[in-house]
Image: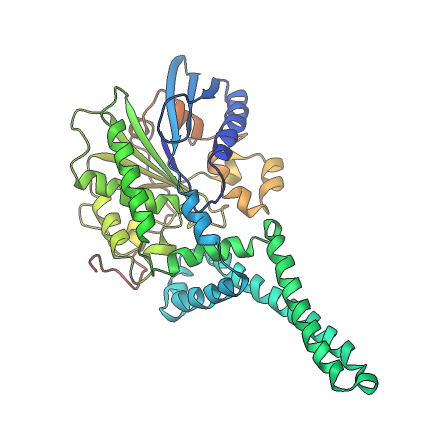
Amino acid sequence: MFYIPGYDPIHPRRYRELYRKEAAAQAEISGYEIALRPKKTKGPYGWHVKARIEGAETRADIEVLVWSDIVRDSMATTIPATYLQLLRTAWEYIATGALGRLMRLRKGPVIAALYPIGMLLAQLLVALLLGWVVYALASLATPLIGAAAQVLGGMGALAMIWAVLRWFKRKDGKFYAYYLMHDYAFSARYRGANPDALETRMAAFQDVIARALTDDVEEVLVVGHSSGAHLAVSILADLIRAGRVPANGPKLAFLSLGQVVPMVSFLREAHRLRADLRYLSAREELTWVDVTAPGDGCAFALCDPVAVSGVAPENKRWPLVFSAQFTRSLSPARWAELRWKFFRLHFQYLCAFDRPLDYDYFQITAGPVSLAARYAGRPPSASRIDVPVSKFTSVAA
């Protein structure tokens, strides 16, 4: 299994530890056995899993396709540069009409997109107000020291503004304003296209997956979470176009979780992504299942990413879109504990459910049943959104 994370600057060991903790919890709840051990072979960061599920013993190799270094580089900006990103990103989404169309889908992720803009502006306002207070207090000394009071007040005000803005940035682990701003700006900067560094990394990911398809395994599963989902779409589309899926090789499967594809595919220069969505949705070489949940305010829940992007072909097969049903698969007590922890809920797809239904991340990634077999005949959610909404639907630059 290959896991493609979203826009995340943190080392992939966090995903190993999350898997270890949550797999143990799910195994206890669901009555199976699962254990992890370190990976000792070369290649991407990962771990080995051994499980006994439904009487079958299974083994799985799980690897994380890392692009956290690219994320960190994109976040290495100054405070003024971040505010410039704010202006550029807001212009790209608002002036092109993309934001208005995204709001027709789900309000949650649009509010999440507006949050860093509002928070950064609020931080600037606080800094300016405190700077004004410093200037006003210094001005009280004008009768004593004359114009020097205003000069000192101006210098003090600028120092206060800068100190407050730096404090907010240092505390961004609580506010997430800079993090989210960099996230949305990453796509908006290139108007939905991929930067060269990311394209190079995606080509390397394709090579890793292609090699796995020549191994003696039953299934090669690619999991794309959050913005990692749209990267997986393009990687798999390129893989199939290049003829790198052996006819008699392992089953190829794609699981997209908590996807935010419309945030990118609705942008005017996202020609590549829209073409890849269109192409992948009609392929027989893979199974594509898309799982979201209305309780996840950061994802475009139950929005068919191909259809809403306006690129669905007549012979569309994928994805199968259904809900993880957080409000039913989590007990009332657990749901009450998590429902306002928006960022935590965005990762719930990778975690244990104390009242599991037909979605179990650990049975999918380490169990004896392939993704295709597990959801064969499973109907899509009736409340899914599968009508074209995007203004931009071109698939060629």
Give the residue at x 28% y 21%.
217
Query: 229 or 387, which is in the foreground?
Result: 229
Do we see residue 301 in this rendering? no
In the image, is 1 to the left or to the right of 7? left
Query: 372 or 358, which is in the foreground?
Result: 372
**Rendered view: 290 above or below 36:** below
**Rendered view: 280 above or below 104:** above
- Residue 112 lies, in percent from the top left, at 50, 56
- Residue 56 lies, in percent from the top left, at 38, 13
**Rendered view: 174 above or below 138:** above
Give the residue at x 29% y 50%.
306
- Residue 6 lies, in percent from the top left, at 42, 44
Say which quadrant the C terminus sits in.
Answer: bottom left
Q: Quadrant of residue 99?
A: bottom left
Give the residue at x 70% y 70%.
130
Do we see residue 183 in this rendering? yes
How many circles with numbers are drawn on the protein? Answer: 0
Q: Quadrant of residue 244?
A: top left
Going by the picture, which residue comes out furthest to the right? 144
